[in-house]
Amino acid sequence: MGALDGKAIIVTGAAGGIGAAAALVLAAAGARLVLSDVNAASGEAAAQAVRDAGGEAVFVAADLASEEAIAALVAKTVQMYGRLDGAFNNAGVEQRNKPLDELTLDEWDLAIRIDLTAVFLCIKHQVKAMLGGGGGAIVNTASSLGQVGLAGASEYCAAKHGVIGLTRAAGADYGARGVRVNAVLPGITATPMIERLSGDPQLAATFERLKLRHSMHRFGQPSEIGDAVVWLLSDQASFVNGATIAVDGGYLSI
Ligand SMILES: NC(=O)c1ccc[n+]([C@@H]2O[C@H](COP(=O)([O-])OP(=O)(O)OC[C@H]3O[C@@H](n4cnc5c(N)ncnc54)[C@H](O)[C@@H]3O)[C@@H](O)[C@H]2O)c1
């Protein structure tokens, strides 16, 4: 028996590094998945990878900048599986690596819209479906940068700090009604997002320094984030609500 046997779960950002790897881990634990992303080609490939591994997954394209698209994603999931038991709200965009005074309002707005507002909208629509079905569990992807700062990342840090506050408050809103809301805080994890950031020659030295700030002196693998998400979405975490779980190789501990 898997920890998520039969549970209907949405994963956003499923075309990306953490989302696609988490999908494989969640499916192996027995979840029935709806994978979603704005990148349809890679999202379809992630769903196919789950099916190739013997799991259950369909892909539904959605741009999380749109509340309508988020509502439709939740509705399609309920239509498909008859219920919604869990969600991994994981889609995100990276920082621009600019000091605050060089950041444009559009760049700020994009990070806040996708990294924070979209998480609010996902929870809003997911919770309605979960309350109708007797409860559920939500995990949001925050970051180590939801608890500490980093130069060149003011918009990302602001959004991820916001995700932590949002997670705590949403857990308080719904904990007594059977919906748990928690967050994972990944440290630097080997994904396309980090390949894009560390590919900048000017940032190579920064990434070497940041690697040593992880007390395990390495970056994470995306499936290691997925392992924590499985637990948080499962009934094994039945008394965990409003929590922030660092999965960061010790980044926040030293
Ligand atoms: N990789 C890391 O080191 C790290 C560390 C801490 C937190 N995170 C967070 O983990 C999450 C996943 O990141 P990742 O490293 O896998 O990055 P990634 O770039 O590989 O994946 C992010 C995914 O989000 C999707 N996305 C972006 N904008 C979207 C939109 N408007 N609508 C729908 N989907 C959209 C992208 O298409 C992509 O598939 C993000 O929230 C990120 O901030 C990553």
Image (cartoon, helix red, strand yellow):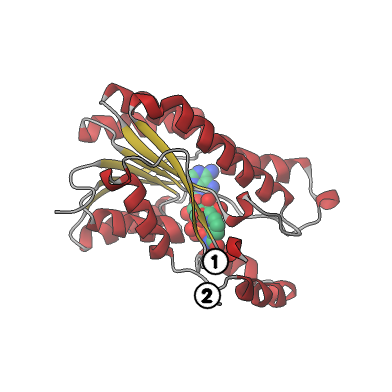
Contact, CB < 8 Å: mark 1 with mark 2? yes
- Residue 149 shows in this picture: yes
SS at circle 1: loop
Mark toward the start of the polypeptide (1 vs 2): 2
Nearest the camera: 56 or 185? 185
Reply above or below: 149 against 210: above
Please name the residue shown 18% across and 47% down the image: 5
Nearest the camera: 71 or 126? 126
Nearest the camera: 167 or 93? 167
Please name the residue shown 56% across and 65% down the image: 188
The residue at the far right in this view is: 101
Q: Is residue 170 left or right of residue 20?
A: right
- Residue 34 shows in this picture: no
Which residue carries the number 2 mark? Answer: 216
Q: Quadrant of the N terminus?
A: bottom left
Pinpoint residue 70: horizontal percent, then vertical percent. Answer: 44, 33
Which amino acid, mark 2?
Met
Which residue carries the number 1 mark? Answer: 250
Q: Residues within 10 Å of mark 2 (few under 14, many from 20)?
A: few
Q: Is residue 80 left or right of residue 146?
A: left
Reply above or below: 199 against 233: below
Q: Quadrant of the C terminus?
A: bottom right
Please name the residue shown 35% across and 59% down the image: 227
Nearest the camera: 179 or 95? 179
Please name the residue shown 29% across and 54% down the image: 26
